[in-house]
Amino acid sequence: MVKLIGCKKTKTAVFISGTGSNLKSLIKFSKTKKSPISIDLIISNNSKAKGLKHGKINKIKKKVFNFNKKNKIENQILSVLKEYEIKMICLAGFMKILSKNFIGKFKGKILNIHPSLLPKYKGLNTHQRVLNNNEKYSGCTVHFVNSKLDSGKIILQKKVKISKNETKNSLGKKVLALEHKLYRKAILKVFNR
């Protein structure tokens, strides 16, 4: 199959720490005709991350970094990204905070998905906190990454109604199903598709 000139997809790296369900969804999306991205690299801080298997299945290169010496590791990641000609980063359940310096190198080119309706419930344990506050709705947000935690410009949000007997697990599943759809839409929006 010959790729048309001008239709080249943007080389993207996905950063994960866990099961990689958003990664799996993004890989599926990247293979569609309308997707503006190709996933060329998976980066993780966890060698036991279940999501790494999606890289193997789809023959996508993976690199695992131990984040003990953050600055040194981030410089190594930056050189790997350069080597693979990565132009965009999607964080998908990546449980490490990137430095201001790292983010600066990819300004406006790092997206993150967060399981709450930002600016509410930044950080961890969002579903339990939402339930503790008796919220009527929760949801997810795709946003640009800046140097403050979960505070970058919002690209898209989607909300979900919280049912009467909701648990953090049932809410988590509901929100995750939304995340898979929302991440794709947000990427299309970023590329004006």
Image (cartoon, rainbow, N blue to C red):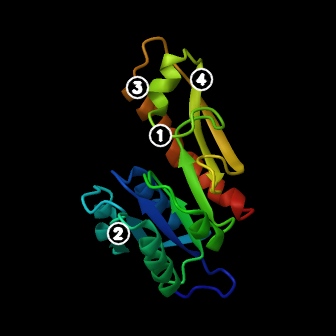
Q: CA distance from mark 3 to mark 1?
A: 14 Å
Query: Which residue is under mark 2?
Result: 65
Residue 23 x %, y %: 43, 58
User: In this image, 20 relative to 190: left or right?
Assistant: left
- Dot in front, 1 or 2: 2
The amino acid beneath tag 4 is Tyr
The amino acid beneath tag 1 is Ala
In the image, which disc is placed on residue 168?
3
Q: Is residue 34 visible?
A: no
Quadrant in the picture for residue 76: bottom left
How packed is label 4: few (under 14 Cα within 10 Å), some, or many (20 or more)? some
The amino acid beneath tag 3 is Lys
Query: Which residue is under mark 4?
Result: 137
Return the disc, 1 or 2, that comes first in the chain's sequence: 2
Q: CA distance from mark 3 to mark 2?
A: 30 Å
Residue at 49 percent across and 35 percent down: it is: 175
Q: Is residue 168 visible?
A: yes
Of all residues, the one furthest to the top in this rendering is: 164
Classify mark 1: helix, strand or loop.
helix
Classify mark 4: helix, strand or loop.
strand
